[in-house]
Structures are given as C-alpha cells and as structure tokens.
Image (tube, grey):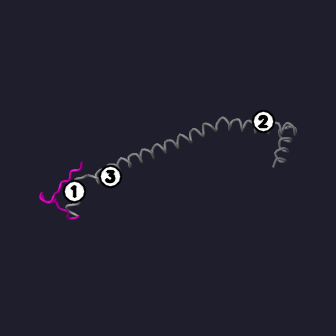
C-alpha cells in the first residue's frame, strides 16, 4: 500500500522519497497533536453525560427511598397494628380486673 502511495507521490506530485516520508511523518504528528487537543473535550462531554445519568438515577432512588420510608411508617403505625390485632387475629382488650400492674424498684 505504501509503495502505491509512494509511486503516486513520485509521479503525480513530484515528491522525492525523503520528502514523502517527511510529509507522512509531519501529517502523523499533526494528527496526534489534533487528537491530543480534542480528546480531553470528548472525555469531558462523555463524563457530563454520565453525570447527568447518575444524577437522574440518584433522584429516582431518593424518591423511591422517601416512598419506602412513608410505607414503613404507615406499616409501623400503632393504630394499624391495633386494628390488625383486633380484626385479623381476634385479640381483645383485657378486662380491668384481669390487669395486674407490677412496679419495679
């Protein structure tokens, strides 16, 4: 492949072999220099997109955490537990004369 390009450069562009290699080297160095200038910006844009995705995920998880805390508090409510004990389990309030109070010293 390089032979074809070199022969094209010699015949059509009238560049010597040394000049061809020099132009190739300069163009490769220029491409690496351009890549070195552009790469940090590409990386910064990619990190920005990742940050936005993570911020959105954090907001969703925070919302879900809030809802789960509300659900936990509603399930731990003493009124709810009292109703479940009375209706589902069949527990009853004790009579006043069957309650014994014990004082600890």
Of the numbered discs 1 and 3, the one sitting upstream in the chain is: 3
* Residue at (84, 47) in percent of width and height: 3
Residue 49 shown left or right of residue 76 in the figure: right
* Residue at (82, 36) in percent of width and height: 22
Secondary element under disc 1, as helix, strand or loop, is helix
Is residue 43 highlighted in magenta?
no
- Mark sitting on residue 82: 1
Question: Could you say which is closer to the camera, residue 81 or residue 105?
Answer: 105
Q: Which residues are magenta?
A: 89-105
Q: Nearer the viewer, mark 2 or mark 1?
A: 1
Q: Nearer the viewer, mark 3 or mark 2?
A: 3
Secondary element under disc 3, as helix, strand or loop, is helix
Name of the residue lying farthest toward the front: 105
Few, some or many C-alpha atoms within 10 Å of disc 2 (few <14, some 14-19, many ≥20)? few
* Residue at (56, 39) in percent of width and height: 45
Please provide percent x and percent y for residue 103: 21, 51
The residue under label 3 is 72
* Residue at (36, 47) in percent of width and height: 66
The residue under label 2 is 26
Secondary element under disc 2, as helix, strand or loop, is helix
């Amino acid at each position: 492949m390089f032979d074809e390009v070199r022969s094209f450069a010699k015949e059509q562009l009238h560049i010597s072999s040394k000049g061809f290699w020099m132009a190739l080297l300069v163009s490769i160095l220029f491409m690496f220099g351009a890549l070195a200038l552009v790469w940090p910006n590409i990386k910064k844009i990619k990190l920005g997109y990742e940050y936005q995705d993570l911020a959105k995920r954090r907001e969703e998880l925070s919302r879900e955490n809030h809802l789960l805390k509300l659900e936990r508090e509603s399930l731990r409510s003493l009124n709810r537990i009292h109703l479940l004990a009375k209706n589902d389990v069949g527990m009853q309030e004790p009579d006043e004369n069957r309650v014994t109070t014990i004082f600890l010293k």
